[in-house]
Image (cartoon, helix red, strand yellow):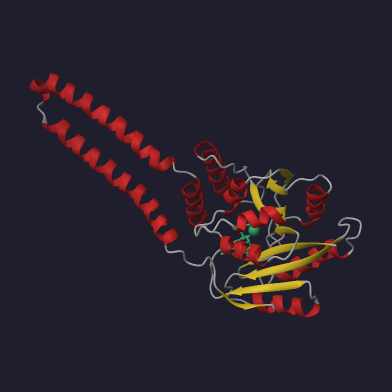
Amino acid sequence: MKLITIIVPCLNEEESIPIFYKEIHKVISDSEQDFPDASFEILFIDDGSKDGTLKEIKNLRDKDNRVRYISFSRNFGKESAIYAGFENARGDYVVCMDVDMQDPPKLLKDMYRAVTVENYDSCATRRVTRKGEPPIRSFFARQFYKIMRKISDTEVMDGARDYRMMKREMADSILSMHEYSRFTKGIYGWVGYKTKWLEFENVERAAGETKWSFWGLFRYAIEGVLAFSTVPLELILWIGVIMSGLSFIALIVSCIFYSFWGFLPLIVSLIVFIGAMQTAFLGVISIYLAKTYLETKKRPIYIYKEKSE
Ligand code: UDP
Ligand code: MG
């Protein structure tokens, strides 16, 4: 008998949890032919919710002992919740899933087939449409994946979800990455392994609302770039080199034309320009420095105050 752990991060999801449970229950309960020789555990991570999320989870736990939970001392973010899930999962196979029904449960059986019969190490999912999402958000998301593909060695698929089933080995590899700034989609790609991709059309949230503001997503995207690419640092070097070249040319030009213009306009604009560039460069360096600072502190990725067992 194989155990499948479903990790479900939740932040203020009291409305979604009963819907999620009902749907997932349907899928896993008459599972004999879809999931031969498999049983399930559902591991909810309450990521510091302020509503009745924990109460809902405990209700489920009371009637179904396949339900387990961990409740954080505060909101640590979805990435930390996923890490906690991996750390506490007992399954031979581990799946990560949103509670808002945007990750279709009907894909679970295809995922299971991929990692058992078809012998993939993991089975990942991506949305091929973004129907129902604000167009501005879709636009920036697309740009993010495009840039990420160009500047990072780690593959991050456009529309990739965190929704993925994997074998124990891969879950352990993910756990071995202790970094504090976690970008799960990048981490999945970085650890490698043979992965099958399933595609699906975007599904809108069943209840509640998204936890991501535009600004929050923007910062998450920057996080992704910083965690999996040093290109911004290299860019500084190249801009510096080009700038030196340009200012050298400017110097020569101003030498030639100085009897018409005088030095002043040129020099002033040069100084201002270079000053501005330096500030920008320092900005990039300090972002990396800040990240390094946080990593060297070796803070725990999450703190829990309560667990189901
Ligand atoms: N989530 C979480 N901690 C957070 C933010 C979100 O555990 O700080 C959970 C949330 O409850 C949901 C999943 O992560 O199960 C995805 O969040 P959401 O649906 O808000 O993101 P979106 O689908 O809009 O990208
Ligand atoms: Mg969602």
Q: Dividing the picture into quarters, in which one does residue 142 lie?
A: top right
Count of numbered tags: 0
Left or right of residue 267, residue 153 in this image: right
Residue found at x 19% / y 38%: 271
In the rendered view, tell whether residue 100 sits above or below residue 133.
Answer: below
In the rendered view, tell whether residue 221 sits above or below residue 66.
Answer: above
Residue 166 at what x, y percent from top left?
A: 72, 53
Residue 227 at what x, y percent from top left?
A: 49, 50
Residue found at x 61% / y 76%: 51
Q: Nearer the viewer, residue 179 or 103?
A: 179
Q: Nearer the viewer, residue 160 or 176?
A: 176
Q: Nearer the viewer, residue 206 or 20?
A: 20
**Residue closest to the far top:** 256
Residue 92 at what x, y percent from top left?
A: 76, 59
In the rendered view, tell whether residue 224 sits above or below residue 244.
Answer: below
Left or right of residue 174, residue 219 in this image: left
Residue 280 at what x, y percent from top left?
A: 32, 45
Quadrant containing ligand 2 reads bottom right
In the rendered view, tell whether residue 89 sits above or below residue 259.
Answer: below
Residue found at x 56% / y 49%: 137
Residue 293 appears in view: yes
Left or right of residue 265, residue 84 in this image: right
Quadrant (top left, top right, bottom left, bottom right) of the N terminus: bottom right
